[in-house]
Image (cartoon, rainbow, N blue to C red):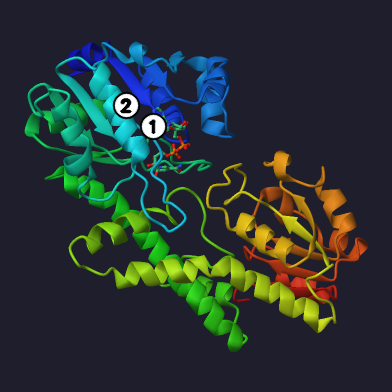
């Protein structure tokens, strides 16, 4: 077994897409002894990686990158001669929530045009069941490769959770599916050589594709449920965060999810649409997923309504109000802005004529002030949209000192009782 592993590590791995998924994966492969090429069309990103730095904030990568060598390139020709290709390109949706598969198509064509016979190609991007068979496989067949003989295609959905101090690409369990037994075994043995978690083989490539959609739709639906409960309980003056904490004392069946001003990131608010659209081809209506998406998409607007209502209570309107927006990224302590509810909130409040003061320590380029102190000094009301550690540490006396009159806590992460006791109007999401 050890001998096979060391032989395998002499193999050349090419990662297509050096983003949140591809870059850590490439770094882990290099750390494990593979000869790694990182291909991307974004040359600015490649220049940063070439210096041993990460283009985005990620502690795991900051430690790992200086220890490994990744041959980064935007030159397709450098893709030639690899044994394993890992496709990690984006799978977004358009303005009407329709899946955009162009990056997967283009990356597959690039690999097919440059690979040698016998290579393993793994799609890591999140896709609906059917994409590997209906889109990826025909590209390789059209390029003259027989799948299961000249090329082995597998799907291994990525589960990395940027900013997670415990789980990373090196220790997360994985599932893999392929079109044939050899492809499955090749993919399994490759992933077993780079991750310490279990690698589970699925019966089909479609099952592997469905696993990831199910995982993320599960989260979206559960978050929608607590967001709906938050809206409902607010009419009864019940604090949903206490209720969820109470329900969490049940030792089985209940799993805590938390309401907030919205769901962001490249996965949860996007992936369910891939399933919704795929099901439509079979005249199946994913009512549950559609409802979850509608509820979660309504949360930025709901949060603005809360702010508007509280401002009206003190006889002010949004128009002209000095509102401090705390946070732009979609989750704590990262700079990722994709699908961030804060961006929707900012856009709408600007249209409503609010005087916005914006600060995100991880997104200085879109902040309108240089520090949290400056934001607090210039604001009358605060809207917390990201639970960055820096925001959660603000002592209540600092709000008082800065004469803050209203705080809308879009992440339910501030001390409600202490804020109210200090005479500041507080509104959380369902609390
Ligand atoms: N971000 C996450 O936390 C996460 C977690 C699990 C799964 N995923 C999935 O992984 C996939 C990648 O997500 P990401 O967050 O890494 O995206 P990303 O945008 O951070 O990175 C993708 C990279 O691919 C590059 N790219 C696009 N088209 C290309 C092409 N044709 N050839 C070469 N490079 C190309 C882009 O320039 C970019 O650098 C998506 O399907 C996503 O749903 C993401």
Looking at the rendered structure, the secondary structure element under dot 1 is loop
Residue 286's tag is none
* Residue tagged 2: 194
Work out whether residue 124 can be spotted.
Answer: no
First of labels 2, 1 by sequence position: 1
Left or right relative to 48: residue 323: right
Q: Decide if ligand 1 comes within 8 Å of the CB at mark 2.
A: no
Provide residue 45's location: percent of width, then percent of height.
54, 25
Provide residue 91's location: percent of width, then percent of height.
38, 44
Q: Quadrant of residue 24?
A: top left
Left or right relative to 272: residue 210: left
Quadrant housing the N terminus: top left
Left or right relative to 151: residue 251: right
Residue with the most extreme bottom position: 236
Residue 170's tag is 1
Looking at the rendered structure, the secondary structure element under dot 2 is helix
Vertical relation: 68 (above or below) 205 = above
Displayed-image quarter of ligand 1: top left
Residue at the spot 33% in from the left edge and 71% down from the top edge? 288
Quadrant housing the C terminus: bottom right
Work out whether residue 351 can be spotted.
Answer: yes
Provide residue 32's location: percent of width, then percent of height.
36, 19
Comparing 183 with 142, the one in front is 142
Comparing 258 with 214, the one in front is 214
Residue at the spot 30% in from the left edge and 46% down from the top edge? 127
Distance Cα–Cα, label 2 vs label 1 = 6 Å
């Amino acid at each position: 077994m050890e001998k096979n592993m060391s032989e395998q590590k002499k193999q050349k791995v090419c990662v297509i897409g050096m983003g949140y998924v591809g870059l850590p994966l490439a770094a882990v492969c290099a750390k494990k002894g593979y000869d790694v090429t990182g291909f991307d069309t974004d040359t600015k990103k490649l220049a940063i990686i070439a210096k041993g730095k990460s283009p985005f904030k990620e502690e795991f990568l900051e430690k790992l990158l200086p220890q490994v060598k990744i041959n980064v390139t935007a030159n397709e020709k450098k893709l030639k001669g690899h044994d394993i290709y890992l496709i990690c390109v984006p799978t977004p949706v358009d303005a009407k929530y329709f899946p955009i598969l162009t990056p997967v198509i283009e990356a597959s064509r690039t690999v097919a045009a440059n690979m040698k016979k016998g290579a393993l190609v793994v799609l890591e991007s999140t896709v609906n069941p059917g994409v590997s068979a209906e889109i990826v496989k025909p590209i390789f067949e059209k390029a003259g490769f027989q799948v299961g003989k000249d090329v082995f295609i597998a799907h291994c959905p990525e589960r990395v959770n940027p900013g997670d101090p415990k789980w990373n690409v090196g220790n997360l369990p994985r599932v893999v599916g392929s079109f044939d037994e050899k492809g499955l075994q090749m993919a399994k043995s490759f992933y077993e050589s780079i991750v310490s978690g279990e690698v589970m083989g699925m019966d089909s490539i479609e099952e592997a594709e469905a696993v990831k959609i199910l995982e993320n739709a599960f989260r979206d639906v559960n978050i929608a449920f607590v967001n709906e409960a938050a809206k409902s309980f607010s009419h009864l003056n019940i604090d949903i965060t206490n209720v969820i904490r109470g329900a969490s004392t049940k030792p089985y069946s209940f799993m805590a999810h938390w309401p907030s001003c919205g769901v962001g990131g490249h996965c949860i608010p996007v992936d369910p649409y891939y399933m919704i659209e795929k099901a439509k081809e079979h005249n199946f209506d994913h009512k549950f997923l559609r409802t979850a998406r509608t509820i979660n998409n309504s949360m930025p607007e709901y949060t603005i309504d809360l702010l508007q209502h509280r401002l009206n209570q003190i006889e002010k309107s949004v128009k002209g109000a000095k509102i401090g927006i705390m946070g732009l990224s979609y989750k704590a302590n990262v700079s990722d802005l994709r699908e961030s509810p804060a961006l929707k909130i900012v856009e709408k409040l600007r249209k409503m004529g609010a005087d916005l003061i914006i600060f995100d320590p991880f997104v200085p380029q879109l902040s309108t002030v240089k520090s949290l102190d400056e934001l607090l000094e210039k604001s009358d009301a605060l809207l917390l949209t990201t639970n960055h550690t820096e925001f959660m540490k603000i002592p209540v006396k600092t709000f008082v000192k800065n004469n803050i009159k209203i705080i809308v806590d879009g992440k339910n992460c501030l001390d409600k009782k202490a804020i109210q006791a200090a005479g500041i109007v507080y509104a959380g999401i369902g609390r």
